[in-house]
Image (tube, rainbow, N blue to C red):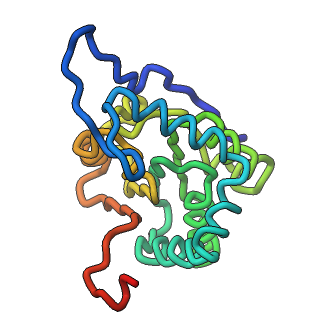
């Protein structure tokens, strides 16, 4: 069955009184670093049950093609252990397991999904509940912070994915540092994210 873990200590972001706080981005505005985690949590808690439908509406369904290509580029071999961070509703995790099953007939691949938002993780848990992947214990889910993956041992995963999630992290350098720590030597870091387009024709 899907294991549902919790790491409430991860990434509290508390700051001593009278300390000078830095600002970071939140959407199209800057906010104090100490506020971002709370603001992100509010947004994702409010949209968790409709998150995939919302992405369909906002991208015209293209996000599904991007994610399919993302997993094809990863091209996980049999037995891959994946850490999917900011994994939310589990769509990347499911694509990963579907790929391993359909391409390799592999039932040994495993994915550990981590997301900071309990409501999003619950949607992911429901996605996998009583599925073949669930019954074979190929997927675990955890509430945790990308900046502090303290429950994940060093050099323990073959691949690390984060799709449309790194922009929501306050300290990206800490996210990357943790990714490097948990990856095995030769492991792969895969980040899917929006960016600016330099070509003015495409950019329009």
Q: Quadrant of the C terminus?
A: bottom left
Depth check: give the residue in front, 45 or 112: 45
Residue found 20% across the figure and 15% down from its top: 19
Q: Quadrant of the N terminus?
A: top right
Q: In the figure, residue 13 lies in which quadrant?
A: top left
In the image, is 150 to the left or to the right of 141?
left
**In the current view of this chain or complex, which residue is farthest to the right?**
130
Q: In the figure, residue 170 lies in which quadrant?
A: top left
Where does residue 163 sit, x and y in percent of width and height? 46, 59
Is residue 119 shown above or below 68? above
Residue found 54% across the figure and 53% down from its top: 110
Residue found 66% across the figure and 46% down from its top: 48
Where does residue 173 sit, x and y in percent of width and height? 22, 44
Is residue 202 shown above or below 37? below
Is residue 108 shown above or below 40? below
Where does residue 45 sit, x and y in percent of width and height? 63, 38
Q: Does residue 159 appear in the picture of this structure?
A: yes
In the image, is 87 to the left or to the right of 45?
left
Is residue 101 shown above or below 119? below
Depth check: give the residue in front, 32 or 111: 32
**In the current view of this chain or complex, which residue is farthest to the bottom?**
201
Where does residue 189 sit, x and y in percent of width and height? 32, 59
In the image, is 163 to the left or to the right of 68?
left
């Amino acid at each position: 069955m899907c294991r549902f873990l919790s790491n409430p200590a991860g990434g509290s972001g508390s700051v001593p009184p009278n300390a000078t706080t830095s600002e970071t981005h939140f959407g199209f505005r800057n906010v104090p670093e100490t506020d971002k985690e709370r603001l992100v949590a509010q947004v994702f808690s409010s949209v968790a049950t409709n998150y995939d439908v919302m992405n369909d509406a906002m991208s015209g369904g293209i996000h599904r093609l991007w994610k399919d290509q993302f997993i094809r580029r990863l091209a996980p071999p049999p037995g891959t252990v994946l850490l999917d961070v900011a994994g939310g509703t589990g769509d990347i995790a499911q694509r990963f397991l579907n790929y391993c099953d359909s391409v390799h007939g592999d039932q040994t691949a495993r994915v550990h999904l981590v997301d900071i938002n309990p409501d999003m993780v619950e949607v992911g848990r429901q996605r996998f509940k009583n599925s073949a992947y669930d019954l074979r214990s190929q997927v675990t889910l955890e509430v945790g912070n990308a900046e502090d993956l303290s429950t994940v041992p060093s050099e323990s995963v073959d691949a690390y994915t984060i799709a449309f999630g790194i922009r929501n992290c306050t300290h990206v350098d800490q996210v990357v540092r943790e990714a490097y720590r948990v990856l095995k030597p030769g492991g792969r870091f895969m980040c899917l994210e929006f960016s600016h387009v330099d070509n003015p024709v495409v950019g329009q």
